[in-house]
Image: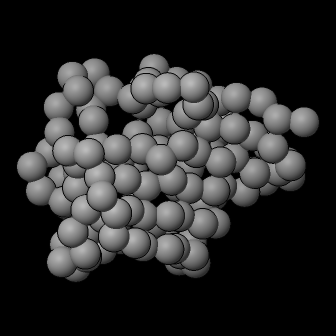
Amino acid sequence: MKSGIRTTNAPQPAGPYSQGIEANGFLYTAGFGPQDPATGALGETVADQTRQVLRNIAAVLAERGLTLDDCVKTTVHLAHLADFAEFNTAYAEFFTEPYPVRTTVGSQLYGILVEIDVVAAIPQDA
């Protein structure tokens, strides 16, 4: 059994997909870009864009009462792997130990510098 998660506090899907899906004790998010959900604005640096992506993801998690601390896995797509150090510094602002496992890859992204999706574990008492 699965159920969709939707919020107006994160960018709306641009196609036939959900912002998040809850299934089997986990919440899976779509890959989010750095668009501000209210204005559509993009940050100029990979650090600014990373922070907005993680705020977008946090908004989806909050719809289920979760936080980024509930994340067990992240997948990160960077337009330029040379931006890794700047990305990593901004990313570290949002997570505490034990950090989620992470895969970071270089990808062709359309007009953005970073995209991230997560898997969060839903506590049994939630």
Apparent side of residue 45 relative to residue 56 in the rendered image (left or right)? left
Q: Quadrant of residue 52?
A: top left
| Residue at position x 90%, y 36% in the image | 1
Q: Residue at x 32, y 27 (%)?
A: 37
Pick the residue in front: 7 or 19: 19
Query: Does the image show residue 39?
Result: yes
Front residue (pair 55, 75) = 75
Q: Residue furthest front?
A: 108
**122 or 36, nearer to the observer:** 36
Q: Residue at left 18%, top 53%?
A: 48
| In the displayed structure image, the side of residue 99 where residue 64 appears, left or right | right
Can you give x and y, in whole percent of width and height, for residue 22 in the image? Answer: 75, 40
Question: To which quarter of the image does residue 73 belong?
Answer: bottom right
Q: Residue, x 48% and y 47% (percent of image)? A: 31
- Asked if residue 126 lies left or right of residue 51, the reply is right
Give the percent coordinates (x, y) of residue 45: 12, 56
- Percent x, y of residue 61: 58, 41
